[in-house]
Image (cartoon, rainbow, N blue to C red):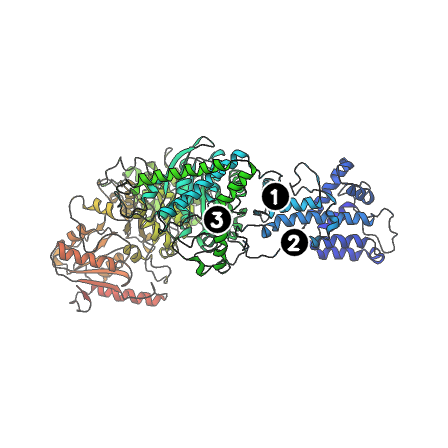
Amino acid sequence: MLRIRTLSNLAASTLPRTNVRVAQSGALCAKGLNISRSVRLLNAASAEPFLNGSSSVYIEEMYDAWQQDPSSVHKSWDAFFRGTVAGAPPGQAHSPVPAVGTPIPSSLPSQVSQKVLQDHLSMQALIRSYQVAGHHIAKLDPLGISSADLDSKTPPALQLAKYSFDDSDLNRVFRLPPITFIGGEEQELRLEDIISRLEDVYCRSIGIEYMFINDLERCNWLRKRFETPGCMTLSHDEKRTLIARLVRSSLFEQFLAKKWSSEKRFGLEGCEVLVPAMKTCIDHSSGFGVESFVMGMPHRGRLDVLANVARKPLEQIFCQFNSKLNADDEGSGDVKYHLGMCHERINHLTNKNIKLSVVANPSHLEAVDPVVQGKTRAEQFYMGDEQGKKVMSILLHGDAAFSGQGVVYETFHLSDLPHYTTHGTVHIVVNNQIGFTTDPRFSRSSPYCTDVARVVNAPIFHVNADDPEAVVHVCRVAAEWRATFHSDCVIDLVCYRKNGHNEIDEPSFTQPRMYKAIGKHPHVLDQYAAKLVKEGVMTDQEYQTERQKYEQICEDAFLKSKKATAIKNSEWLDSPWPNFFDERDPMKAPDTSVSEERIKHIGDLFSSSPVKDFAIHNGVKRILKGRADLMEKRQADWALGEAIAIGSLLMEQTHVRLSGQDVERGTFSHRHHVIHDQEQDAHTFVPLNHLAPDQALYKVCNSSLSEYAVLGFELGYSLTNPNALVIWEAQFGDFANTAQCIIDQFLSSGQAKWVRQSGLVMLLPHGYEGMGPEHSSGRMERFLQMCNDDEEHVPVLNDNFMMQQLHEINWFICNPSTPANMCHLLRRQVHLAFRKPLIVFTPKYLLRHPEARSSFDDFTDGTEFQRLIPSSVDPSNVEKLIFCTGKVYYDMKTMRVETENNSKVALCRIEQLSPFPYDLVKKEIERYPNARIAWAQEEHKNMGAWSYVFPRLKTLLRTKMGITKRVEYIGRFPAASTATGNKQAHLTEISHFMKDAMDLSPVPEQKALS
């Protein structure tokens, strides 16, 4: 006799295994009896390929319920179980396959019960089909001309005929399985009602993608929020709040269009529901305890979001349209639709105080994503918010950028990393169904623009933006999802763009059909207002009053804006630092020295074994012993100098964060700030976190293999609190190439555009050791080219010269050559009265070079960062004064000894390239009045610092010293590639320019540069 366990296993099994079972039942197959049931089950499984075992669970659940109370299940199940198993419990009813010729038991179920089983399994498969694929036929496009998934066909899984049902089955009653909540309190529904409810949930204005999530609890959680009858219904008060927000969003855009019809503003027309959507997310997240919201977005709709979400005063926004107003404070400013802000206000729905920050963003659309995440993570850290319950991020995206820009993928992959997670982000895609002018079918390969989010198991809620109530429901679920599971989710607002890419663009050139439909399409506000009036939620008079009230608010703000005499860029700060600048003197040089007692304390801990029973790698033991030996000699190598800087700042209550690829040990295995137990993989020890009981925390963060997103993240982290040292290290300096957008748009120009200071430090390993073109150059020339100082102007060389330079430059470019100078440089970064990014070209070859060491005397009282390290050669016999920077100094020093030119060639190291140390260079030239002047570098002539240094040396000689000396270039010839990949060629190049450096013969005319 076949019992229930055999049947359930058969339903769950795969096709080949089922065939084997059927074939083994020789007599049954021959008589055509049991084979009927097997084939029916098999057909059901093959019709629904993702059944995969859920049928067996369903049958056994029905069986358990039937055992407890036969009346609790549908009568068809009662008949089936009575006729099939006679009460045998699952797991105990197995009987072997009958031998050939065995008589057929008389208790086999009837053909009716076999069809009932097949139909119930088909019904379950049908439900799962809607849950998996219903979004493909949802009515998402407000214009009704496109399919959000780029495919207008109905998936086969959603066709009723696939399940052997026809119209005669629609009135049949089925007991609902536990995989759905569409029944609410009802346990049984007619098939027609089941299909109707599934379509209402999955195929109307909302399309949900969640069945790819490999967590049953989360899937069931989502089902309950969308399938429960009545769950999407809003109260009258909620509908009135919704239309009030929609009025503000819509009329704001209409007001701007009326007053500044020819201005670019990248308006929100076509997706005005974004404002109610964001406010719903904020309201509900505030109810869950969130106090601070960090938001990032592209330019589309930014002004509306600033006005109606962040509540930026309207008159300040309107001022930005007055081209005659100049800034009355620092900064060149930016176009209005790139600006950010920070504002604190009461959330009236929760009666809680909340902070809203909109982070400034250039036209590089998704570049702001990691910046927002870093800022959010920093706020969580400083608030002690370890689970992200108080601070959250909201990211807005465009559809083409979301699918097309790699930084989106990089940022998603930070979402669950221990040192980078923000414990859940709500992503909102303003899906115009078009990029600039490109049709989606030509701008992405995936069905949806949001498919990148599937890699992190983020649920995706597609919603028709012309259904405001559906949008509000989705946003509520998104806020609750984030509060419950602390992971990302995506809201895809499928909408349209009323105008072209900007307000003066003609979109019909490339989208004639779409814009014909847009021209005829009723506005969402008019649609929703008519709906509420029809429902009796509000009268037409009340609606008109709401409109008039906001129109008057705009007019009053417009009149105020006309009285403005200047624009204050400081009003657009997205990361204000209260009292930071008030308490400091920007012209006072900081003290960066460290006492010898503290140096020894840091060094002893940094060079000792962590704790008992901690298995240290033998290589690390040797490194620790080497550090201890240096301590006895009162010397520091590069790793120890770096540790002294970080350790001393930690003991001064300064939080330090070091991030990048493999920074725990360092790319060149010199750092080892995190020591790993060799017998317990997760057991680690960070020596610098054990210096003092009241020290600040040191975070050493190995990152994902990303530069763009991780550098952006660290930039965002640095914006939150100026009293911290935030460092990003590239594995090799030239790897920063892939983060160029962050460097160009945020770091070098952020203060000028957005009055936003950052003290972020970039460490870029740089140096030519024959390692090939991708492991040599940190592209020093690119950073120097972006400095904002004038090569033809030498500032007044007074007592405040150094600090004035530091204050006015946009960032610092340094190439330190000693551990002590590196230590002072990092400490100076924190102790300055202002913040500028610091770009440091760090060594590789010098990390363990015996001559590249510093005495403790170079760290202690009276010492500071040396912008220039002068030559120690007696001036009387010097014939050539060579300026250089970085590692090449040590190469030339060795060559100087070999050529016996110790007294004739003076080597001077410029450690701070920008701002250029005119005062110290002038002093050095004056020390050697009879010497020729040269610049030496290991980089090619069209790279490195030559193009920056040469015009400044020439200007200094001409305007400040009245000297007509020529400046000689020593180095490699121009090239397209940064370095040769051939070791022998590398050595030959070095040999040639080292020979030129020590050559004291008269300078050939073609080599001298005036």
Do callouts 2 and 1 mark residues in contact (Cβ within 8 Å)?
Answer: no
Is residue 349 placed above or below 682 in the rendered structure?
Answer: above
Asked if residue 624 can be seen in this view, the reply is no
Residue marked by disc 1: 216
Q: Amino acid at mark 1?
A: Leu
Looking at the image, tell me whether mark 2 or mark 3 is earlier in sequence order.
2
Q: How far, Cα to Cα, is label 3 from label 1? A: 26 Å
How far apart, in angstroms, are the residues tagged by discs 2 and 3? 28 Å
Q: Quadrant of residue 72?
A: top right
Q: Secondary structure at mark 2?
A: helix
* Secondary structure found at label 3: strand
Dot 3 corresponds to which residue?
Answer: 429
Question: Can I make out residue 642 in this image?
Answer: yes
Q: Position of residue 21 (x, y in %)?
A: 77, 55
Q: Residue at x 77, y 53 (%)?
A: 38
Q: Name above or below for residue 612 compared with residue 776.
A: above
Name the outermost residue toward the front.
541
- The residue where tag 2 is placed is 157
Direction from residue 550 to residue 456 in the image, left or right: right
The answer to which of marks 3 and 1 sits earlier in the sequence is: 1
> Which image quarter holds the C terminus?
bottom left
